[in-house]
Each structure stands twice: as C-alpha cells, then as structure tokens.
Image (cartoon, rainbow, N blue to C red):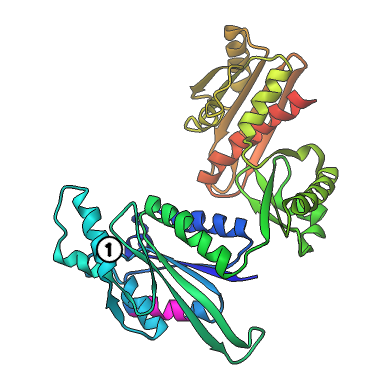
C-alpha cells in the first residue's frame, strides 16, 4: 500500500492570509483510493526549502502531491524546486506553451513572455494539460535508495505538482492524477470512514468505555472533541466495499451498545437537526430564549431550517429571571416546548442556567465551564440542545 504526503506551497497560506482547502480535498480522495497519508505540510515560496521538503518526503512516501507555486511570476517556485529535488534541470516544452497560449486567448488576451515560465517543467516529467487554467501540471517519477530502516531498499514514487487554485486542482486531480495513481500503484483497496456524533458525555468518559476499541488496527477508532460534542471516527480498509462496510457495522454496533443514547447521529447529521426531528416526532412546536450567547443558540437551530421551530429570541436576563421569561414566551407562541439558556461569564469559571419546559414538565440544569470564555459560548448551546433532544427522545 503506497504512502502519500501532501505539500501545500504558498507564503500567503503560511502567514494565514488565505485558508488551505486543497489539503483536505486531496486527502479525502486519496483516502478513498486506499492510500495512507503520512504527513501534510505547508511551506512558503522558497525554492531551497521546498526542494528539501520534497527530498525529505521522498524518503518516506511513494506519492508526493504539491499544490501551488505554478503561476507565471518570479515567486512561483514549484517547478524549480521539484527539479532540484529530483536532481535534474528544467526544460521548455513547446506543446505546453501552445496549450498556455491557447488558453490565454480564450480570455481575449495575448500570452505574455513571463507566462512562458509555466511551460518549463523538470526534465523527463510527464506534462499534464490544464484544461481549466493556464498553469500546466506535471508528474516526476523517481527512485530513491533507502539505506536503513523498515523501508530499506529502492523506493519508486512520483511527485505530482498541481495548481493552487482549488477548482483547477480538483479538475486535474480527477481528470489525470487519480487515473494515473490507480494504474501506477495498482490501487485495489478502498478506505471508508464513518463518524458517530455524541453529546452528553466527555471525551475522557467515552475513552473509558471504548478505549480497547481504539487499539484496533483495522478498523481504527479515534476520538475528536469539540465544544459540547465528541466525534468517534471509524476507519476501515479492505478489498471490497461489502467487506469494509461489514467491519464498520460490527464496530459501530459494539460502540452503540456501550454508549447508547449518547450517540445522536452519524456522518452529516447535526445535533440541531436530529433534535428538531425528534421534537417533530413528539408533535411539539418549540421556541427558544437565550441570554449572553450572542445569538449562537438561534443560529445553530435555524441552520436546520425546521418548521417545528416557531421562534428564537434573545434577551438580557439577570440570574434567576429565566424561568418567568421562558414561560411567558411559551405562552405567547402557544408552543408545547420551550428551551431557555442564560449564560453568565466569570473569571475562571463560566456559568449557564438551562431550562426546558415541555408537556412532561420542567427540567433545569446549572452548567459550569472552566475553559476559555469563547469556547463556553459554543459549548453551552450544544449542551442545551442535547437536553432538548434527550427529552424529545424519551
């Protein structure tokens, strides 16, 4: 099974001026092909540093994918860096220049001399026409001697350089790169991921209940904690989709048996959407009231676009004032259920009052949070929504 590393090139990404979405997109597609991803790296526009990074990756991985740095300007360094890493010079390709010139004329412009830089690729590279942009791509196949360690011997691999513009990168990945990888590395395994979403139990408590499963090799089980929600990621690898699905189903069933209703959904499910669906099954219409949360509870629920959500209101409430205000709001809208939360920031500890009113009665919770105040603003609404979910599912 080949291993891959992804190198994102661009000082603007390194300095946080733009967000890198290419790495995530490439990683997901490689995962689905059954390729193991060892590292993702972001590096600025420096030829020597990029070359050294690529050389380091060549010692670890068979597939190295770079994005960015293929433009026509002086500070687009990828072509030269890949050539240095591979130990070759760059060479001008007339056919690539013709493709660039043709593409530029579609914009009603004449190709400039500096755009000729884009027609240079490392010697011996496989040139790839960019049918949606002016930056040709290329593949450099390499062999490198690994003298020691587990991978001792000659490693054969490929450096694949793609544009930084996301739509161009995506097009080239599917049009040229994936077919190339499937043929070159005989990719006949698939990897599938299933995510179980939980709320109402902390990461440490979940780990205590399923820690033995986290030691499995295939499928693998991992935890990712968010504010008020913990995800359990299951990843399985196999030759057939049926076999992979079977492995995932077996482990998922075990986890569900251990955690029960703490699990509220899978994959694309959201806590707000699942909760409002449960509310609908109970035949309830719901209103919400929040204080001190900057409208975060409202935004989470309204994203679900659910007809059973009658109203979401904001107020500024003193401690102890939530109950009267929530009862009044429920009566005003003639709603069966009303969820209220009042957040009170403090030094070192954040506090929130939660009240839920349903046809079954009233439930209140006093929440305390010791982390960063900004995290508390996301944590508290999720805890409140989960309280409504549990009540609706009873």
Instruction: Name the spot of residue 219 as percent of width and height, x first.
Output: 75, 58
Closer to the camera, 164 or 123? Answer: 123
Q: In the image, is residue 272 above or below residue 337?
A: below
Closer to the camera, 138 or 295? Answer: 138
Instruction: Name the spot of residue 249 as percent of width and height, x first.
Output: 79, 47
Please report the residue visible at 67 percent of the width from the left and 53 percent of the height from the top.
Answer: 192
Left or right: residue 313 compared with residue 115: right
Closer to the camera, 323 or 298? Answer: 298
Left or right: residue 113 compared with residue 103: left
Q: In the image, is residue 392 above or below residue 256?
A: above
Main SS of the magenta part reads helix
Q: Residues within 10 Å of mark 1 (few under 14, many from 20)?
A: many
Residue 260's image quarter? top right
Left or right: residue 388 compared with residue 158: right
Residue that mark 1 sits on: 71
Q: In the image, is residue 175 above or below residue 317?
A: below
Q: In the image, is residue 168 above or below residue 58?
A: above
Instruction: Name the spot of residue 95 as percent of width and height, x first.
Output: 28, 66
Instruction: Name the spot of residue 263 as percent of width and height, x first.
Output: 74, 40
Look at the image and tell me in which quarter the N terminus lies. bottom right
Q: Which residues are magenta?
A: 48-55
Please report the residue visible at 32 percent of the width from the left and 66 percent of the height from the top.
Answer: 69
Q: Is residue 153 visible?
A: yes
Residue 140's image quarter? bottom left
Which residue of the protein is positioned furthest toward the bottom in this rendering? Answer: 147
Q: Check residue 126 for magenta coloring.
A: no
Residue 112's image quarter? bottom left
Label 1 element class? loop
Closer to the camera, 332 or 22? Answer: 22
Count of marks placed on residues: 1
Look at the image and tell me in which quarter the C terminus lies. top right
Left or right: residue 246 compared with residue 290: right
């Amino acid at each position: 099974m080949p291993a891959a590393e992804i190198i994102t090139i661009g000082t603007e990404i390194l300095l946080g001026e733009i967000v890198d979405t290419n790495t995530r997109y490439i990683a997901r597609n490689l995962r689905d092909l059954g390729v193991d991803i060892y590292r993702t790296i972001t590096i600025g526009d420096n030829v020597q540093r990029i070359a050294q990074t690529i050389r380091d990756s060549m010692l670890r991985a068979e597939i190295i994918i770079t994005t960015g740095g293929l433009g026509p300007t002086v500070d687009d360094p990828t072509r030269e860096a890949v050539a240095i890493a591979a130990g070759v010079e760059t060479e001008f390709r007339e056919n690539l220049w013709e493709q660039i010139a043709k593409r530029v004329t579609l914009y009603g412009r004449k190709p400039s001399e500096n755009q000729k830089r884009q027609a240079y690729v490392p010697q011996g590279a496989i040139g790839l026409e960019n049918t949606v942009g002016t930056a040709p791509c290329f593949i450099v196949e390499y062999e490198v001697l690994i003298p020691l360690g587990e991978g001792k011997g000659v490693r054969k691999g490929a450096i694949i350089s793609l544009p930084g513009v996301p739509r161009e990168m995506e097009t080239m990945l599917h049009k040229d790169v994936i077919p190339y990888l499937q043929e070159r590395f005989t990719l006949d395994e698939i990897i599938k991921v299933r995510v179980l979403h939980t709320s109402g139990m902390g990461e440490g408590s979940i780990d205590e209940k399923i820690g033995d499963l986290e030691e499995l090799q295939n499928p693998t089980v991992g935890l990712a904690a968010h504010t008020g929600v913990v995800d359990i990621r299951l990843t399985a690898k196999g030759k057939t989709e049926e076999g992979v699905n079977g492995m995932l189903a077996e482990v998922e069933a075990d986890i569900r048996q251990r955690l029960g209703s703490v699990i509220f959904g899978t994959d694309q499910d959201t806590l707000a959407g699942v909760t409002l669906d449960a509310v609908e099954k109970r035949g309830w219409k719901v209103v919400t009231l929040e204080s001190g949360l900057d409208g975060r509870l409202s935004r989470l629920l309204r994203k679900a676009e659910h007809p059973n959500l009658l109203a979401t209101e904001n107020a500024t409430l003193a401690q102890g004032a939530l109950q009267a205000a929530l009862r009044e709001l429920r009566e005003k809208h003639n709603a069966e259920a009303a969820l209220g939360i009042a957040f009170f920031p403090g030094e070192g500890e954040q506090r929130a009052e939660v009240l839920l009113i349903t046809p079954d009665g009233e439930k209140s919770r006093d929440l305390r949070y010791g982390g960063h105040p900004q995290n508390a603003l996301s944590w508290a609404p999720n805890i409140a929504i989960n309280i409504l979910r549990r009540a609706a599912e009873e």
